[in-house]
Image (cartoon, rainbow, N blue to C red):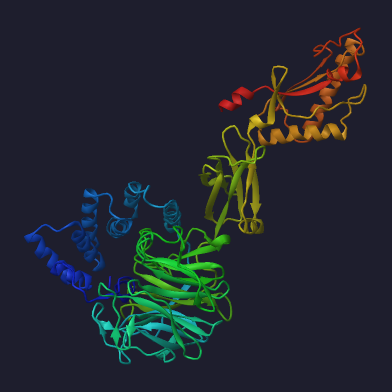
């Protein structure tokens, strides 16, 4: 792979003048002379044993020069001796392994670090691994634009009917930038043709001129301003921190040519600004010590471009053990590039849907067309004048004109796989408390399992799968009811807009003990005198039985009806049987199966619960205590064991 400007300049780029106590090989490595550093490390290894950091530097040097076999072997040797190797180095080890041994072996080694990686990264890995196994035809047409040069050209941004981009071609007063061997970066402008090609370009003259880096522009049409990165400098002299480090800042130029620094720290570099006008957020990439790996994506709140907050990390759903750069938001989706190990090559472009409360869906690898086995990054996108989408991105894929080239693309459909994602809480309908480790399952139209997950200790869950037109959502837990509903098309789209809480109930909450039996909880109801007609009041209670059987389809029930002692024994026996049969008929009509109702029995006055037997005077209220119906759960104990 070519030693391109993005990894050398944007991800590593700082110039140092201070000389630390380090070897000649270290000096070569930190000045980005990786091939020379490899030779010198080999010389120094014959004299003295390298320390751990020097071995890591050597592995990195092999990695950056494309010798993935040797870099993988070195990373692996270091990992075997010290499994606390940082996730950033572990990511490069897996990248090397993927390029030389295939993705299949990655899963085994990932198991060794599951506890150190955020859960979101592991979910991203599983999702994209399955996605890349069977990629559909992309339908994307890609064109290497004519204005590319033999030097690095990358980071396009729309500028009305033109584009701005970054280039290392030396058209003005830029000097050579030693690490890359090319000119200091400059911002260029070119005209977009009808077919998306860019034919003519020249240096952009609406930002203050400097002999140092000016790169990765973003044009905010709403502010009529341009955000870009530039070297910290004072006139023609670079500015250094106390350790001799020169970093990169983010500046802004308005329509009148007035410039101001927005993000500037002599010890920290900022890359790839993107301004979202609807929220006033300024997104960027930076390599802060508290990040998740290499370069992470952050944002700050602004007021008309003025910074109003400290940087906020986008979190582990977006940022990984690798490097994330080039944020771009279009149609409520975040596009960005990452070199995390589960991609197709070095840098790949991903898409994540933005949900409420600044949450993101699983980033989806855009697949072949946009991505390749090389580095692909810095995508921008907008609607075509006719139909579909068009945009640009940079890549150092084979067949280009230079170090990095800009490619235009068109697509008849949205980029990336459409997904279905829901989140919420599985809660107990009786207690309103979350159900720990509740099982949530998504099934396709044929009833085949798509994905199965378990809620956390509070009952919270989140699940995302490739979109299908029909998806059945199920939730259950031991000794709880089963929730099951099928959603279609537009229902699935609306379902994702908000939290989707799922109510289930424990069997224990639906039953109680009466007369040494386990029965369904019902309010006591009464038939009319000498009647077996199901009144609306009775139906209201019997509907609870229907609901219980719906929630617990394996329930086996006995309907037991009793009368008081008034009237003859034979009359009361017949009346109670008529009432049990009427209840059974009602339940069957409401969809309860005969398999659920094993018995419907009338006991008459056989089981009087008080002293109101034949010939004993009692008040009506005491006689009514004996008139009752119990819905007995015959298999309660065995159901709890299932």
Instruction: Indicate the quadrant where residue 539 lies.
Output: top right
Instruction: In the displayed orientation, state which residue is furthest to the left.
Output: 47
Task: Give the answer, above or below, for where 535 lies relative to 576.
Answer: below
The residue positioned 84% from the left and 31% from the top of the image is 538
Between 532 and 409, the one lying in front of the other is 532
| Image quadrant in which the C terminus is located | top right
The residue positioned 55% from the left and 40% from the top of the image is 438
| Image quadrant in which the N terminus is located | bottom left
Task: Give the answer, above or below, for where 609 lies relative to 84.
Answer: above
417 sits to left or right of 531: left
Task: Name the spot of residue 318 as percent of width and height, x first.
Answer: 45, 61
Count the numbered circles shown. Answer: 0
Instruction: In the displayed orientation, state which residue is furthest to the front.
Output: 242
Task: Name the spot of residue 592 as percent of width and height, x first.
Answer: 74, 32
476 sits to left or right of 579: left
Task: Name the spot of residue 242 as percent of width and height, x first.
Answer: 27, 73
Q: Is residue 143 visible?
A: no
Task: Give the answer, above or below, for where 518 lies relative to 54.
Answer: above
Q: Is residue 93 visible?
A: yes
Between 352 and 31, the one lying in front of the other is 31
387 sits to left or right of 560: left
Instruction: In the displayed orientation, state which residue is furthest to the top.
Output: 615
Task: Name the spot of residue 174 as percent of width and height, x first.
Answer: 30, 88
Task: Give the answer, above or below, for where 423 lies relative to 221.
Answer: above
Between 10 and 97, the one lying in front of the other is 10
455 sits to left or right of 25: right
The residue positioned 16% from the left and 71% from the top of the image is 36
């Amino acid at each position: 792979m070519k030693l391109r400007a993005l990894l050398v300049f944007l991800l590593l780029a700082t110039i140092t003048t201070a000389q630390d106590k380090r070897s000649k090989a270290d000096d070569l490595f930190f000045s980005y002379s990786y091939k020379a550093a490899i030779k010198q490390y080999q010389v120094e290894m014959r004299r003295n044993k390298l320390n751990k950091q020097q071995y890591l530097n050597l592995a990195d040097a092999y990695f950056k020069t494309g010798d993935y076999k040797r870099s993988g072997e070195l990373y692996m040797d270091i990992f075997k001796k010290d499994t606390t190797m940082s996730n950033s180095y572990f990511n490069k080890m897996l990248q090397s392994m993927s390029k030389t041994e295939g993705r299949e072996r990655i899963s085994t080694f990932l198991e060794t670090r599951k506890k150190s990686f955020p859960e979101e990264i592991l979910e991203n890995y599983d999702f994209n691994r399955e996605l890349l196994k069977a990629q559909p035809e992309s339908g994307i047409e890609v064109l290497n634009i004519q204005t590319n040069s033999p030097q690095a050209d990358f980071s396009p941004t729309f500028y009305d009917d033109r584009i701005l981009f970054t280039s290392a071609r030396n058209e003005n007063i830029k000097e050579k930038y030693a690490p890359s061997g090319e000119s200091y970066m400059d911002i260029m402008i070119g005209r977009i043709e009808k077919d998306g090609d860019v034919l003519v370009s020249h240096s952009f003259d609406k930002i203050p001129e400097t002999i140092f880096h000016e790169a990765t522009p973003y044009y905010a049409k709403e502010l009529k301003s341009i955000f870009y990165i530039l070297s910290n400098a004072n006139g023609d002299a670079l500015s250094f921190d106390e350790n001799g480090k020169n970093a990169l800042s983010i500046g802004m130029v308005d329509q009148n040519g007035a410039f101001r620094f927005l993000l500037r720290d002599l010890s920290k570099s900022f890359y790839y600004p993107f301004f979202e006008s609807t929220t006033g957020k300024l997104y960027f990439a930076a390599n802060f010590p508290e990040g998740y790996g290499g370069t992470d994506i952050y944002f700050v709140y602004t007021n008309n471009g003025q910074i109003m907050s400290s940087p906020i990390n986008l979190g582990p759903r977006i940022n990984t053990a690798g490097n994330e750069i080039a944020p771009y938001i279009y149609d409520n989706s975040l596009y960005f590039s990452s070199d995390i190990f589960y991609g197709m090559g070095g840098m790949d472009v991903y898409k994540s849907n933005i949900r409420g409360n600044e949450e993101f869906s699983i980033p989806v690898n855009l697949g072949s067309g946009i991505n390749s086995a090389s580095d692909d990054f810095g995508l921008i996108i907008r609607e075509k004048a006719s139909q579909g989408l068009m945009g640009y991105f940079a890549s150092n894929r084979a067949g280009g004109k230079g170090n990095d080239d800009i490619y235009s693309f068109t697509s008849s459909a949205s980029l990336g796989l459409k997904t279905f994602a829901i989140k919420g809480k599985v809660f107990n309908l009786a207690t309103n408390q979350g159900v720990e480790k509740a099982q949530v399952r998504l099934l396709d139209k044929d009833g085949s399992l798509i994905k199965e997950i378990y809620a956390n200790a509070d009952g919270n869950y989140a699940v995302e799968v490739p979109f299908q037109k029909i998806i059945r959502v199920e939730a259950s837990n031991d000794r709880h009811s089963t929730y099951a509903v099928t959603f279609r098309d537009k229902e699935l789209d609306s379902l994702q807009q908000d939290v989707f809480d799922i109510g289930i109930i424990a069997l224990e909450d639906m039953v109680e003990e009466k007369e040494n039996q386990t029965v369904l909880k019902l309010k006591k109801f009464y038939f009319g005198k000498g009647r077996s007609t199901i009144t609306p009041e009775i139906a209201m209670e019997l509907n609870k039985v229907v609901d219980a059987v719906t929630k617990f389809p394996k329930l086996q029930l006995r309907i037991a009806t009793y009368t008081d002692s008034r009237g003859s024994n034979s009359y009361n026996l017949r009346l109670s049987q008529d009432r049990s049969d009427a209840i059974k008929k009602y339940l069957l009509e409401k969809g309860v199966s005969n398999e659920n109702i094993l018995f419907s029995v009338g006991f008459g006055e056989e089981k009087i619960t008080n002293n109101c037997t034949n010939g004993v005077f009692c008040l009506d209220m005491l006689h009514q205590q004996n008139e009752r119906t119990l819905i007995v759960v015959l298999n309660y104990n065995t159901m709890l064991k299932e």
